[in-house]
Amino acid sequence: MRHCIQRSHGAVSTAAQLPSRPVASPARMLDRSRSSQSVESSSFRQRIVKGSVMPEDRTEHNAVQASKFSKPSTIKVFSNKLPESIEKKLARIKLACIVNSPPDLGPDSRIVDVGSGTGCLIPHMQARGVKDILAVDLSEAMLKELSDRYVTVGTLGNDLEDILAVDLSETMLSILAVEVSETVLMELSDRYMTVGILGHDLGVRTWLGDIVDVPMYMGRGCDAVFMNGCFGNMHSPRDALLHSALLTKPGGHIVVSHPMGRAWHRKLREGDMDMVPHELPDRAALEAMLVGLPLRITEFVDKDDHYCATLQVPPAYAFPSGAPPLLLEGPVVRGFGRGSRLLAVPTANIDPFGLGDVLKSLPLGVYFGWAKLDAPSNFASADNTVHKAVLNIGRRPTVNQGDEALSVEAHILHDFNDTEGEKADFVEFYGSKLRVLLLGYIRPEMRFAGGLPELISRINIDVATSKNLLDEAELQALKSDERLTAPWASEE
């Protein structure tokens, strides 16, 4: 009865974080075999947290998971057909309920199935009409079994012999500091690929790796992410939720479930904490885990034989509980000079000291909304109107050169020009007043292991997301909010 009870979920090595075939090359299989044997026989370092035994090294943890779930005996258990009576019970009472947790799934939906194992959820997804499914798992053997059953389209764009020496890996793009848009990738695919490469083909596809390493072009804009029977196995459940939230479109859902329930899972964990380092969280623990994430609980079921938490990325990334837009106002001050110089994203920094308790109520991260600058008199009249903006509140962990102070950085999506038509530098606005009306919260502040290229890529996604959201009629109406348009207070 472990077909859909406990599944693996993530990456094996640095190489496995890139798209890869369900069947590895002999050399890679040999490397993995050696790695798995050495890891599984060792007691790798762990740190203890409440309800968890947290492995310190993600690659090592994932290698242990992959090794355990790739054993032939395990594959056999997951692959054998269950007795009909048990299959019907699971389908009727548990698995079908899990897949039915997000509303409105259908033929146009895109799903990421994390810890997919041999694909026990796929028939239930397909029964709802879903055609586009990305199966993510650590175990190559599991994905091979799943592929034999369900895959009908190109796997992941890892069929490199069909790419004609065009390297589209995110690692290579980062090394070259080149950003390739999805439009460019699609054009390359149309010209050179004989198999699906971008994860947009309808059908079941596979991704060998950790959910936190699934690239944006593979899963971004999905309607739902499922984590069934694998949440306790993950190196960092919170990181898995964060990356899943980044993949999920506003209004989409993430479902964390276990068909045997939390009590059964706790006993399983007690028997093997290497395999299951984390308990399934009760509602209070889950609420604490979600602090700072753009997620909210819409349904929570915690029964003796059924656990299912349904989370939602708020529509339009709206603030929780219908909280109204929040206004930040203050003088433009000197920042750290990196916006234009390093990131090509000029920012106007608001003095955080004047914002007082307002900042204390906000998680560090990326917001979007409307901004109005009291531009100098020698600038065009359009510069004094309301413009789209992306705002970061935080300490810039990717580029922070020490114990740098918190900053409030507004990237105003407008080209400022003086009356002579010359493009302005924000240095000319120091001391000018700036208002930003925050309408939503996109993501927490993050440290990007890939450095500046990865940070810049994410900033571009944040900017594009903000532009699109602010085009919606409901948010356009807030452009005339009287708090933004009120006359500027005269200088004393």
Image: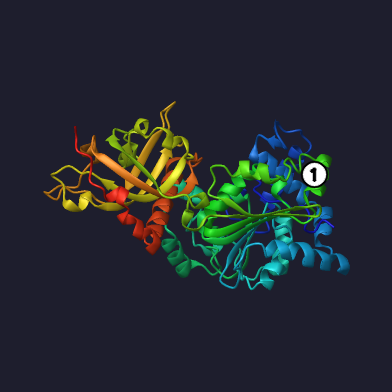
**Neighbourhood count class around disc 1 (C-alpha, 10 Å): few under 14, some 14–19, many 20 upward:** some
Q: Does residue 367 appear left or right of residue 105 in this picture?
A: left
Q: Does residue 140 appear left or right of residue 74 in this picture?
A: left
Vertical placement of 188 versus 323: above or below?
A: below
Residue where numbered disc 1 is placed: 266
| Residue 345 visible to the viewer | no
The scheme the figure's colours follow is: rainbow
Vertical placement of 91 versus 481: above or below?
A: below
How far across and how far down the image is residue 286, in percent? 65, 45
Q: Residue at x 47, y 53 (%)?
A: 318
Q: Residue at x 42, y 63 (%)?
A: 183
**Quarter placement of the C terminus:** top left
How far across and how far down the image is residue 337, in percent? 31, 35
The furthest residue to the top? 403
Picture quadrant where residue 228 is located? bottom right
Tag count in the figure? Answer: 1
What amino acid type should be assigned to the residue bearing mark 1?
Arg
Picture quadrant where residue 40 is located? top right
Q: Residue at x 46, y 48 (%)?
A: 441
Picture quadrant where residue 182 is located? bottom left
